Image (tube, helix red, strand yellow):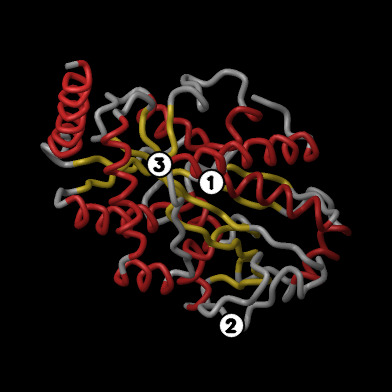
Amino acid sequence: MNKYRIGIVCLLWFWSSCVLAQSYLSGPLTLVVPFAPGGGTDIIGRIFADQLGKQLAQRVVVENRSGAGTVIGTNAVAKAKPDGHTMLVNGASMAFFPALFKDLPFDPVRDLRIVSLVSEQPYVVTVTSSFRPRNLKEFTALAHARPNEIAYASAGIGSGTHLASELLWQELGIKLTHVPYKGTAPAVTDLLSGYIQVMYTTAAGAGGMIKAGRVRALAVSSTKRLASLPDVPTISEAGVKGFRQVSWIALFVPTGVPEPILERLHGATVAALRSNELVEQYEIKGLQAVHSVSLGEANRFLESERTRWAGVIRNTGITPK
């Protein structure tokens, strides 16, 4: 009798889990991008949202909520109802937060859960067309001669472009003046106008401007040259041997989303990232489609990134805010 009861309980649990995983798709889902429209993360978010919606047979609406180094948009998702309807795409900021900020409106470790990686891409050192250096060596020499006189833009204090830039400047042994913006797009606007001279940004965000000749690319942070930018040397080729740095983007949800919904969302994410349509769209933008094989692997990746970037923050001398 006990075995019979246990079997009935297990069957009911399985059935209720399946019903829950299906029923949560009762309306459109929201994918929050914590950056302004037009930047690299926004491009990734929109491509991914379209394919994820196809896998779930439900509309996924992209909502841009930029500002404060992704804190505003991230906080909105952290405080959202944990029913699987509100999601976030964010990158290394999620690894920076614990070491970079003392007082956040949310707990980055406790309040959000990673579902899967969704993209990787290298960075590109871009400069305004009127900037004198023609390559990374000339740029480094000028920065050595004029410490803190050259201004560089980022998507905000504590953003991926901010800390990635500081890590590169440290590798090059130079000092530049940081000018933070509320997202990549407004930073790019000032780069194009010549108000800002330098920006170390992602391939997705810079590729179109480079190809159009509106900005000049000095080097890329991948180990090999990009197929989309074959004439741009790698940072390693330009003198920093073995240098490699990539920007990653992952999907997050509020902690508390039921496990069956998490599993359903993870499966749909993997299917979306394996679709030929998404892979082709990513490649055009200089992106690589990557995914975590399980929720557990995604968690382990994020934990390792938090440990790694805590060390980088200490070494660069950035003071927690």
* Quarter occupied by residue 143: bottom right
Other-residue count near label 3 (Cα within 10 Å), few / some / many at <14 / 14–19 / ≥20 = many
Query: Which of the two labelled residues, at mark 1 and mark 3, occupies the earlier sequence position?
Result: 3
Can you tell which quarter of the image residue 191 is in?
bottom right
Amino acid type, mark 2: Pro
Q: Which residue is mark 2?
A: 230
Quadrant location of the C terminus in the rendered image: top right
Return the residue at label 3.
115
SS state under label 1: loop
Instruction: Decide if residue 89 is on the left or right side of residue 101.
Output: left
Labels 3, 2: front one: 3
Q: Amino acid at mark 3?
A: Val
Which residue is painted at 62% across and 83% down in the image? Answer: 231
Q: Is residue 77 left or right of residue 20?
A: right
Is residue 129 or residue 240 the one in the foreground?
A: 240
The residue located at (59%, 36%) in the rendering is 303
- Circle count: 3
> What amino acid is labelled 1 in the image?
Ala
**Relative vertical location of residue 1 with respect to residue 46 in this rendering, above or below:** above
Element type at mark 2 = loop
Nearer the observer, disc 1 or disc 2? 2
- Residue linked to disc 1: 155
Residue contact at pointers 1 and 3, CB within 8 angstroms? no
Query: In which quadrant of the rendered view does residue 311 lie?
Result: top right
Residue extending farthest front: 1
Which one is in front, 105 or 11? 11
On screen, residue 218 versus residue 296, left or right, reads right
User: Along the polypeptide, which appears first: circle 1 or circle 2?
Assistant: 1
Looking at marks 3 and 2 on the same chain, the residue that comes earlier in the sequence is marked by 3
Label 3 element class: strand
Q: Position of residue 91 (x, y in %)?
A: 51, 45
